[in-house]
Image (cartoon, coloured by chain):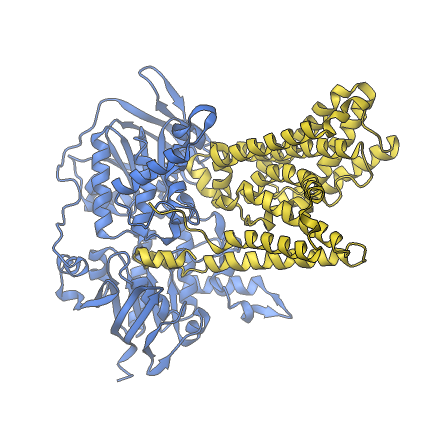
Chain colours: A blue, B yellow
Amino acid sequence: MSGENILEVRGLNKYFGPTHANRDITFTVRRGEIKGLIGENGSGKSTLISQIAGLYPWDSGEIVFNGEKYCPRSPIDANNCGISMVMQELGVIGSLPAGVNVFLGRTNQFTKNGVVSLKALNRAAEEVFEKWGLPKVPLNKLTDGMMIEARKIIELARALSVDPQLLLLDEITQSLSLNNRNKLYEIIRKLKEMGRSVIVITHDVEELIQITDTITVLRDGAVVGDVVSKETTPDEIKRMMVGRDISGAYYRADMTPAFGEKVVLSVRDLTVPGEFENLSYDLHEGEILGFCGLSDSGIHAVGKAVYGLARPSSGSVRLKVSETETVAIDRADTALRRNMAYVPKDRDSEALMLHASILENFNLPSLTDLEGKAGYLAPKKLKKRAADLVASMKVKCTDIFQTMDALSGGNKQKVNLGRWLAKEPKVLILDCPTRGVDVGVKAYIYALMKEAKKKGIAIILISDELTEVLGMADRLIVMKGGKVTARIRRDEDFTEQSVIGVMI
Amino acid sequence: MKKRNIGLQDVVPFAAFVIIFAFFEIASKGKMLSPFSLQMMLDQSVMTIVSGCGVLFVVAMGSIDLSVGVNLALSGVLAVWAANAAGGALLVPVALVTGLLVGLFNGVIVARFKVPSFMLSIAMLIGIRGIVNFIQTNIGTQFIPEATRVFAEGYIRYPLFFVIVAVMWYVLEYTRFGKYCKAIGENETMAKFVGVPVERVKVLAFALSGLMAGFAALFSVTSVGGTTQQMGVFFEMKVAMAIFLGGVLVTGGFSAKLYKVLLGSFSITIIVNGLALIGLSETQYSQSFQGLLLLIILGVTILASSRRRKVPSTLDEEEPDPVANESRGK
């Protein structure tokens, strides 16, 4: 039996205070099996695999790994047993170079007389990248300034460098663009061929069915179903996750672009060195303008540049402020003052104050509007506004004084989005707004976007999810290597095939 | 709506204050609570509090200003010199402008050239002390002009002190500038991405810290009656200690509250005076004793706040259920 199953989890229970995060979880992973784990935010997936990865102990039950009782004391301990993990929230140390991050906690092997040989370490890191065909990342650079995708790849390299028998991937695909996703799928296939096993967590049901052999569905901390991927459908999985039928139509139904005549924002010949060049476009009132492209296409820098956060070498971003007047947006504080809004991709490190209250997070972008005489910010006014927003955005929390880090990903995103929508901005820039949220919140975010569009808010939607851009945008700009390769309108050839054709 | 959860890390500084106060009150057989002793302790805390109110804005941003001690010395020395040379009317403006300029310089260097504030203010601490020593060896210690002694009177001194504290309280807790400082401390990248003018806020916060050092210099020279050789020595440490002792986290952010400066300053004063009252200050090891007490209080505070932050990193997976969060808040 131990020859067949690499991992057996039996009756596992985990409590966080009174919260029963995992209830009697029992499931097995066979050798060479790709196992999918899916469930809504808060269903206990990450908790489950974090325990397997040795991040924290379970309260009762047992895990058998490789036929032996398994009880890791730390992630390093788990590594030594042959289990490694890529975490959902970012797990690299920003002040260390990429290469060192790959061998974090295991630099001893490169130590001579108490000194770590960076040369040997980087060589070993390079070998890992080559062996698994990972996209190149500058190994000597600090990870601090790197894009979220590069940091994820470093984490993946770290997990693979252990040469794991069992690899745990927690929502990694959502941070990757299409080309690197394909590389990841290849790695997973390779591991399978080698007889290694993988547990994958993702919110993307279609993707999960495609890449896994079997899927275990969790709801409220308990296993509610085990299915074979080939024999199931996305709808069946969604039904199991939520416990009821949910309609699949959360995107727009119409296929005609619909937006106002007025140009709200115009970008001319904008060049940001190393990101993109000579980008020009107009954004209209009530328009959703989509941007898509692979990882080096520069689409994420487009959002930053529009909000005045990049240093363009040439070109201009101009916002219409009245019938006759436009202003240049070259700094973020100008953008804020002129009522623009930016929702960055990396929610936790770029958008939120995790240790501060919901109240403070909600009000930060609107402080100027809330000021009374002598710049007085009346606590009553701030509290009322936050309470109203919590209610209207349906944020699940105990009260407005709760700190952000106690909220689930979906609820964090509601706060992040709600604080901007409440200002009714002229231009709303969304960079991967549904990253790491479950189907329910996703549907809600799309509904909010439709509503904002109706109000005449101009939206720039940058996304790694092609279906999302195709589902929501009026026009689409496809980029590749920092240049525009196609501009497609909703009533033209608006399909995945045609976009992928010009994207790669 | 429920009231804000009160965490252990907010309670400890209060408890420490009460305990040391009670301890010295009993150990000194009630001398601590005499009007004379209380007024003396307030007088001793005034400078720390005034300067601490300014430094608090810097600490809220997750930075530190260790130059307030030498800033106080420079502002004081220049102001007294100017007042003696060209008339008493110059005392106040010269003290304040000097303090402000030093702070402005700090702010520009930190914000524009991204020099870590810790290193910059240590460099300033050494460099400006040199300037102060140079000036003092040339002109010697000086007395303030007769006309400016009025500042030492209670009816000017205390109202001025209370107005300063009230204004700083207002700016920190109820204005955009105060919130922005805290937001930078919570997450500087976030602040930048939201559109907070981070550079400008930093320059202003350091300038404010400098201005408050200028005010502290005024209180210093008027209460002593002139300049001294030891002016401002170790003052920056006392101010920083007061802030952290009051329960402000080194990372700043929304843990920065003005009452904590008052609490920390009084705690320090009580320790120093309490040791004197029970006759320990004459011994050679009284300073070690002060250090030990501070260490214990800080240790407990940090222990309390780190326990609160020890939450599983995958909270994302937990349903924010009301009961669970309450237990986590403690």
Residue A74 percent location from the top left of the image? 45, 71
Picture quarter containing residue B34? top right
Place residue A368 in its image quadrant.
top left
Q: Is residue A100 above or below residue B269?
A: below
Q: Is residue A423 above or below residue B278?
A: above
Residue in the image at 17% along x and 43% along y: A251
Q: Position of residue A243 (x, y in %)?
A: 15, 59
Identify the residue at image location x=51%, y=33%: B170
Drawn side of residue A362 relative to residue B34, left or right: left
Q: Is residue B264 above or below residue B153?
A: below
The answer to whether A222 appears left or right of B330 in the picture is: left
Please report the residue visible at 18 percent of the width from the left and 57 percent of the height from the top.
A242
Instruction: In this rendered view, identify the residue nearer to me: A166 or B93.
Output: B93
- Whether residue A474 is visible, yes or no, is no
Residue B92 position in % (x across, y down): 71, 24
Q: Extreme bottom residue here?
A: A1
Res. A444 visible in picture: yes
How far across and down, in percent of the image, does residue B2 sit? 35, 47
Q: Quadrant of residue A261?
A: top left
Total number of numbered discs in the rendering: 0
Please state, as top left, top right, bottom left or bottom right, where the N terminus of chain A lies in the image. bottom left
**Along the line of sight, the residue nearer the viewer: A25 or B295:** B295
Q: Is residue A396 above or below residue A419?
A: below
**Left/right of residue A149 with respect to residue B76 in the rendered view:** left
In the image, farthest residue toward the top: A324
